[in-house]
Amino acid sequence: MARYLELAMAACLAATAAMTQAAAEETTADAYGTTNPEELTWQSLRDRAERGETDMMVCASGYLMTKSGDHATARAIFEACAEAGYTAAMTWMGYMEQNGFGGPFDPDAAARWDRRAAEAGDPVGKFNYGIGLMRGFGTAQDEAAGRALVDEAARDGLEIAKRLQGAGYDLDEITPDADNWRYAPMF
């Protein structure tokens, strides 16, 4: 009888160890659903965005990812959120395109994202697209239309837009001189 109890205890311990190991391993799905799902990991947030599950938590995580240098994940999240209508994600996509984060440097794409955000009423989108129009960066230059958008952003309460107005629309007020090369004419 002691040998039987010994074997039963060993089998029970082995089963417990196997179950513990399985729980610690990768997420699995079966007929009953997903067991031990990843939660609040960068990959799980990216997966949610790719499935179209965009909410404030998912969309805001793109900021942390781009600031940590994971631009590919940030881009995937921002793009999904922008396509879902989050205007802040549109302006972040403009930032990603303008700086070549997670993809090639593309001022035209940056301007398109900023224009979409502006057309959706986002003050940062209005400001960014207005600056692009004033410079002719990623879009045809139209200083009057650019100033009008900056003015709208200022009326919406955007402080940097008010600052640019107060400087007589002098773009040096808002652009570090280290970035001047980027906005200079190509020829």
Image (tube, rainbow, N blue to C red):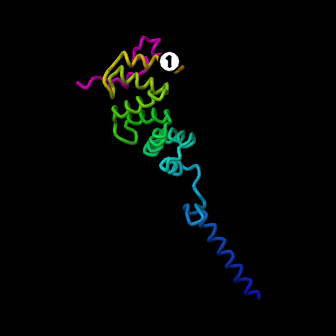
Circle 1 — which element?
Answer: helix
Which residue lies at the image location 62% right of the left edge and 71% below the top edge? Answer: 18
Indicate whether 100 appears above or below 155: below
65 sits to left or right of 132: right
Front position in the image: 10 or 47: 47
Whole-percent x, y for residue 184 in the image: 30, 23
Magenta-colored stretch includes residue 56 = no
Q: Amino acid at mark 1?
A: Ala
Q: Main secondary structure of the magenta part?
A: helix
Quarter occupied by the N terminus: bottom right
Which residue lies at the image location 48% right of the left edge and 16% below the top edge? Answer: 163
Which residue lies at the image location 73% right of the left edge and 86% below the top edge? Answer: 4
Residue farthest along the right direction in this orientation: 1
**Residue 17 occupies which quadrant of the picture?**
bottom right
Dot 1 alpha-carbon crowd within 10 angstroms: few under 14, some 14 to 19, many 20 or more: many
Range of residues picked out in magenta:
159-187
140 sits to left or right of 41: left
Which residue lies at the image location 49% right of the left edge and 33% below the top edge? Answer: 87
Count of numbered circles in the view: 1
Whole-percent x, y for residue 146 in the image: 39, 19
Magenta-colored stretch includes residue 172 = yes
**Residue 55 occupies which quadrant of the picture?**
top right
Front position in the image: 10 or 141: 141
Whole-percent x, y for residue 15 in the image: 65, 74
Q: Which residue is mark 1?
A: 154
Whole-percent x, y for residue 158 in the image: 52, 21
